[in-house]
Amino acid sequence: MRSATTAIAVEGLERAFDEVLAVRGVDIAVGEGEIFGFLGPNGAGKTTTVRMLTTLLLPTGGRATVAGHDVVAEARQVRASIGVALQEAALDPLMTGRELIRLQATLQGLPGAEGRRRADDLLERVDLADAADRRVGTYSGGMQRRLDLAAALVHEPRVLFLDEPTTGLDPVSRKTIWEEVRALNDDGTTVFLTTQYLEEADQLADNVGIIDRGTIVAEGTPEALKAEIGNPHVQLQLAEGSVAAAEQACAPIGKLLPPRDARTVLVDVENGSADIPRIVRALDEAGIEVGALELVRPTLDDVFVAKTGHHLEKEEDGSGAGAEPEPIEA
Amino acid sequence: MSELRKTARVVGALGMRSIRQTFRRPQLIAPILVFPTLLLAIQTGGAGGAVNLPGFPPVQGFLQFMLAGAMMQSLMLAGNSGGIALAVDIEMGFTDRLFAAPIPRYAIVLGRLAGTAALGLFAAIWFLAIGLIFGAELHSGVVAVPIAIVLVTATAMAVGGIGAAIALRTGSASVVQGLFPLVLVVLFLSSAFFPNGLMIQPARAIAEYNPLSFVVEGIRDPIVSSVDAGTELEALLAVLGIAALGLVLSARALRHRLRVG
């Protein structure tokens, strides 16, 4: 959860590539020990922002501090405080997993013996101990992401940047990464997580920033953002009985919304799932048989649509990027 | 641990990775050892009579003459391969891992050059061993060994700087790989494979001023005749010149790479 101290503070951050302004005055505040979900479609400016915060790219405007250090003036101190796992795990396929983690330990200035110990511990932690001496090129996508994550943790960073850590992974691998992110956060690590998966941001993030076309369009807790959109509603699919009778039965419980079709009733419910038993009882008393009942909550995509006028799912490349991943049990 | 010692550890670790990478990727090791060895065998066997041409410097045999050329070919291609490997690192994002670490960024280039220098050292020992096994004499004695090792290792590092600069500037392995024929052209327009005095113009003029010719003569002289201080000094100056060029170009290219991200 957000704490009193700020781990990442971004003010008016900008980055231009020639005439194109990829990031336009971004403001973000991430508290110490928080998981911040940075959500947006491909090309929105997520990766450019992360590259500036991780000192891989110089901003052309604004300022940012990470772990209390300016990303331009104190870049080296920033790099010593952060762990970075970038999009498309940047791994050398010719190295073994163990060689990579040990190299990372050397890069972070850990003494030899401590680096070796940390490498062994981390390989064990991400369940790669058995594959540690195999070349990375033989690893599956999920194993590569776990190795990349382990490498980012070798020096126990205060702030961890994960750039789309689960893109392209199967549900099991994705769940493993989520569990690891939660465990890290429980240990006090601040996590800056970029994602184009709504469910990922919803499940993991304490706070979410939504970026579109280089601009932050919304920021807050997932629940607060969704609450801005409105109450959840109950969607009833009638098996028998008239829609009019069902609407009459439900009217005292919540505001009726325009139905989608002749067999559906939509009821806006202020109290969410707590109103469902009342609706069921009212329909039962009216002798109306319900085929299906579903509580529909506003999603972050609804927030995105409300703020930008278009869905997070990206239409332009047809690759499915930005689409919801296959749902998994959280 | 002092800052300098930490940086030295990083350079050593990156150099070790560079060496492993070369030996694990056949397309990198082949140009450095296999091709020059084959060319040495073919030229020595097929063009050995060249030593009888009028004006050919006095040598024990063509193998003895060719050893310096084989070492030069090997080190030049080691520099080129180092550039290709760095460009591959940029293409696959591995350099981001290095740039995001709290190390001086020049250490990333130095690590690559340390690996290239080690390959140069290996090439010098390899070709000296081949020469000795197949009967080439070291005319000035054992002193030819350290001179060859120092010059080959230092030149490999210097040439590697130019390869690294091109890799950092372009970020494209195919562009660096495309320079492979150019490396051979520059090498053939030196005294690596044939004495300057027997070349025709304008190749002769180019070879006389080609810095690589000075290095070649610095390696060759102790093998085929005696150690001449002037020749060795010229070789050393040529290496320093190439190194300075590589250093300036790679420093500028590194700044460019960091600027464009």
Image: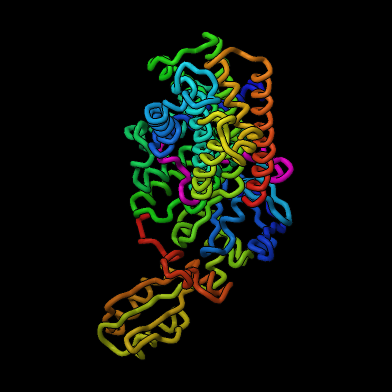
Confirm whether the magenta stretch covers residue B157: no
Residue A154 placement (x, y as % from top left): 51, 34
> Toward which corner of the image does residue A297 lie, by quadrant?
bottom left
Q: Can I make out residue B149 in this image?
A: no
> Toward which corner of the image does residue A246 lie, by quadrant?
bottom left
Q: Give the vertical position of A13 relative to B255 (above or below).
A: below
Q: Nearer the viewer, residue A290 or A168?
A: A168
Q: Give the vertical position of B204 relative to A228 (above or below).
A: above
Residue at 52% from the left image edge and 16% from the top image edge: B223
Q: Give the vertical position of B148 relative to B214 (above or below).
A: above
Confirm whether the magenta stretch covers residue A88: yes
Residue B256 placement (x, y as % from top left): 66, 47
Magenta region: A69-94
Q: Give the vertical position of A6 relative to B5 (above or below).
A: below
Residue A12 placement (x, y as % from top left): 72, 58
Q: Nearer the viewer, residue A117 or A328?
A: A117
Residue at 60% from the left image edge and 56% from the top image edge: A48
